[in-house]
């Protein structure tokens, strides 16, 4: 749960300072936290001057907050809140509405907000209205979604197991947001496989219910791999796995169905050792509250851009029945074959150098190649609409690595805000379709 702090700014000179607005708004914010999933973890006494602001700033920093709301109950000059704006945590400036509309000016809070945003020297979001107002709630909900993504990218811990797939050199890049990456060799997987009890494999086989072109007995090594991967994944937020060529060569099965079944249980795996892809998946999951997947751009036609991968998607993404089938190249068990469900998607690709791509669009629900697949239509780039051809041109013109991380639902605004909080540069579309772009 996100931890939110509140510092009310109240200058006694204003009539509104004597109405107890900071107390009623705190109570309303606490109720809103139950609905939006945050804890009001720190509330200061009303601040009226620079000395009180310094005290509140020290306490807010010690509270390990995800967001500090500096609330203009009344107008105040910059000395009364500048120490709060300088904190190394996300800060929002919030002005309450005036309690009456004629006669003596009660608070002048929105003018204080205007002064505050003009003095901010780092990303600072403004809020206006009471905690019950729909505009305030919509802006705050968007920020909470963004900060959930930012938190996992700053504080998460992932495992890079085996390095990147052969020749996929771009996947060697590491995140620069604070995410902890621990590295291990595939020998740890071989040890984990050897330690899986036969009784546990039998239990997985007895519980298996998914449609499959293989009899259950032919999937025993797949279940063993699933259990070994689960054991290794448990301490982490996610795993970037080099799932070929060593796993099929040594174990005789492809890892994709095991990864898919683990994804059904809430684990996040990125194929081909793509650590930045994994980081993108974790952010998408945190923002959307749903599992995210990595996909390749595999075909382009009048239907749209066909997105596909080898068959490791969770059933939550399925647009119909799923089944386990042979891998399209190696003819080994097994991959999960399914269409990707129709509906809006949001995409994020974290890049080296503190950059990112944010995109979206609609999946049309039509299946393509074996594995998990669907056509992207009506694409957007940083919330701006593009044609499919313009989207494809932008992706190639920026030379983006070939994994596209996508999450369920329309969350581009939250992803864009997340990038701002993290100081990431969001690349603009580069839809030049004819000339060389470099």
Image (spheres, rainbow, N blue to C red):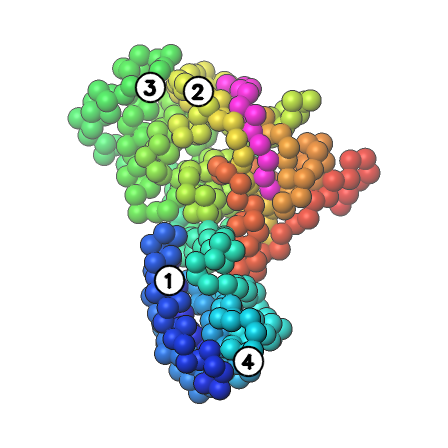
Q: Which residue is mark 2?
A: 320
Front position among marks 3 and 2: 2
The residues bearing labels 2 and 1 have C-alpha atoms spaced at a distance of 43 Å
Q: Earlier in the sequence, mark 2 or mark 4?
A: 4
For marks 2 and 1, give the one nearer the viewer: 1
CA distance for labels 4 and 1? 26 Å
The residues tagged by marks 1 and 3 sit, at their Cα atoms, a distance apart of 47 Å
Q: Residue at x 50, y 63 (%)?
A: 129
State the mark number for residue 104. 4
Label 2 CA crowd tier, 10 Å (few <14, some 14–19, many 20+): few
Q: Position of residue 275 (x, y in %)?
A: 48, 45
Left or right of 168: which side holds 290? left
- What span is in magenta? 359-374
N-term-proximal mark, 3 vs 4: 4
Residue where numbered disc 1 is placed: 28
> Quadrant where the N terminus lies?
bottom left
Binning the other alpha carbons within 10 Å of mark 3 as few (below 14), some (14 to 19) or many (20 upward) gives few
> Relative to residue 364, is residue 50 depicted above or below?
below
Residue nearest the viewer, comparing 205 with 392: 392
* Residue ranking furthest to the front: 103
Which residue is disc 3 drawn over? Answer: 210
Image location (x, y in percent) of residue 317: 44, 29
**Of the image marks 4 and 1, the number of the one nearer the N terminus:** 1
Q: Which mark lies nearer to you, 4 or 1?
A: 4
């Amino acid at each position: 749960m996100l931890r939110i702090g509140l510092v009310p700014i109240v200058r006694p000179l204003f009539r509104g300072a004597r109405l107890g607005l900071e107390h009623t708004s705190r109570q309303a914010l606490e109720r809103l936290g139950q609905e939006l999933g945050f804890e009001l973890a720190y509330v200061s006494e009303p601040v009226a001057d620079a000395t009180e602001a310094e005290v509140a700033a020290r306490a807010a920093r010690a509270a390990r907050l995800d967001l500090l709301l500096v609330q203009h109950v009344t107008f105040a000059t910059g000395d009364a809140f500048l120490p709060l704006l300088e904190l190394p945590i996300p800060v929002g400036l919030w002005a309450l509405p005036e309690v009456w509309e004629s006669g003596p000016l009660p608070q002048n809070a929105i003018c204080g907000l205007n002064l505050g945003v003009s003095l901010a020297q780092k990303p600072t979001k403004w809020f206006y209205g009471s905690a019950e107002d729909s505009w305030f709630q919509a802006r705050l909900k968007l920020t909470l979604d963004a900060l959930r993504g930012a938190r996992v990218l700053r504080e998460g811990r992932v495992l890079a197991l085996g390095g990147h797939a052969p020749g996929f050199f771009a996947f060697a890049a590491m995140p620069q947001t604070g995410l902890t990456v621990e590295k291990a060799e595939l020998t740890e997987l071989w040890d984990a496989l050897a330690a899986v009890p036969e009784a546990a494999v039998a239990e997985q086989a007895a519980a298996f219910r998914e449609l499959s072109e293989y009899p259950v007995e032919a999937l025993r090594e797949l279940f063993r791999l699933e259990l070994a991967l689960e054991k290794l994944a448990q301490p982490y937020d996610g795993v970037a796995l080099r799932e070929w060529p060593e796993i099929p060569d040594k174990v005789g099965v492809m890892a994709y169905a095991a990864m898919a079944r683990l994804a059904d249980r809430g684990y996040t795996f990125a194929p081909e050792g793509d650590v930045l892809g994994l980081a993108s998946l974790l952010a998408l999951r945190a923002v959307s509250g749903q599992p995210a997947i990595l996909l390749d751009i595999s075909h382009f036609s009048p239907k749209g851009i066909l997105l596909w991968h080898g068959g490791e998607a969770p059933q939550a993404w399925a647009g119909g029945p799923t089944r386990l089938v042979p891998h399209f190249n190696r003819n080994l068990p097994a991959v999960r074959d399914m269409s990707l469900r129709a509906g809006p998607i949001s995409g994020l690709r974290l890049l080296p150098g503190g950059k990112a791509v944010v995109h979206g669009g609609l999946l049309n629900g039509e299946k393509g190649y074996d594995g998990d697949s669907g056509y992207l239509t009506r694409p957007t780039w940083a919330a701006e609409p593009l044609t499919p051809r313009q989207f494809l041109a932008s992706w190639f013109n920026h030379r983006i690595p070939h994994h596209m991380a996508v999450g369920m639902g329309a969350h581009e605004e939250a992803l864009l805000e997340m990038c701002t909080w993290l100081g990431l540069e969001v690349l603009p579309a580069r839809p030049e379709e004819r000339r060389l772009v470099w």
